Image (spheres, rainbow, N blue to C red):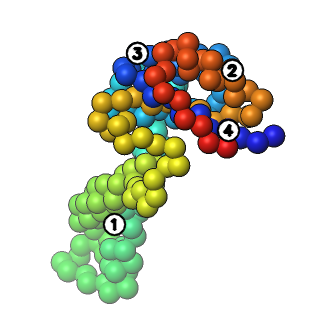
Amino acid sequence: MSQVRILASFGDGANAARAVALLRTLDVDDVLAYSPTPDHAILAELQRDVSPVRLFTLVGAGLGCFLGVAFPVYTMLDLPLITGGKPTISIPPLVVIGFTLAMLLGALGGLTGFLSMARLPALSRPVLYDPRFSDDRFGVLATCESDHAESVRACFRDAGAEELKEQL
């Protein structure tokens, strides 16, 4: 079967949220919403999972903490400067360096995760997109099998879609 992409344009977010809810009753899984402003009704209907960006941050912070402790310990063991009978590996400077690198790499990991999950920079525009979605319109893009296309169109019309575009 071939895939069909149907893009509906709405005048307000309530109709777009209703369209997403109707598509969910049809078991259409591949739904994307465009909104000029954050709309909590649409986000609630999309039922997205928690963003994995926080995992990138955690991995970056863990790696930074490990490197912030491992490199100075390696340096302390490679060039032991014993002064006044103090231990070769001193904990207080390791805490400062480990914390600093954890914050730095955690922030860089979060930024990397954000950019990769948001697919930025966008080098190409989506195939079906209307620039008005960044101005004053709401859009819902559904990808479905060609035999379900008519029911998806009917859902969009029932929700109050003002314009429909299709791509095979």
The amino acid beneath tag 4 is Val
Which residue is denoted by mark 4 in the rendering? 4
| Separation (CA) of disc 3 from disc 1 | 50 Å
Question: Mark 3 is on which residue type?
Answer: Ala
**CB under 8 Å between callouts 3 and 1?**
no
107 relative to 130, above or below: below
Quadrant of the image occupied by residue 138: top left
Q: Which part of the image, by quadrant, shows the C terminus?
A: top right
The label nearer to you, 1 versus 2, is 2
- Write down the residue under mark 1: 68
Q: Amino acid at mark 2?
A: Ser
Query: Which residue is at the far top?
Result: 158
Q: In the rendered image, which residue does mark 3 sit on? A: 14
Q: Give the CA distance from mark 1 to mark 4.
A: 51 Å
Q: Residue at x 53, y 49 (%)?
A: 127
- Closer to the chain start, of discs 2 and 3, is 3
N-term-proximal mark, 1 vs 2: 1
Give the distance between the C-alpha atoms of the residues marked 1 and 2, in whole angstroms.
Answer: 57 Å
Q: Where does the image place residue 122, in percent across and percent down from the top left?
A: 42, 56
| Mark 3 vs 4, N-terminal side | 4
Q: Earlier in the sequence, mark 4 or mark 2?
A: 4
Q: Viewer-nearest of labels 2 and 3?
A: 2
Q: Are marks 4 and 2 in contact (CB under 8 Å)?
A: no
Is residue 115 rendered to the left or right of residue 168?
left
Per the image, the residue denoted by label 2 is: 151
Decide which of 42, 117 is in the foreground and name it: 42
Amino acid type at mark 1: Gly
Q: Is residue 32 left or right of residue 53?
A: right
The crowd level at tag 4 (other Cα within 10 Å; few <14, some 14-19, many 20+) is some
Q: Residues within 10 Å of mark 1 (few under 14, many from 20)?
A: many
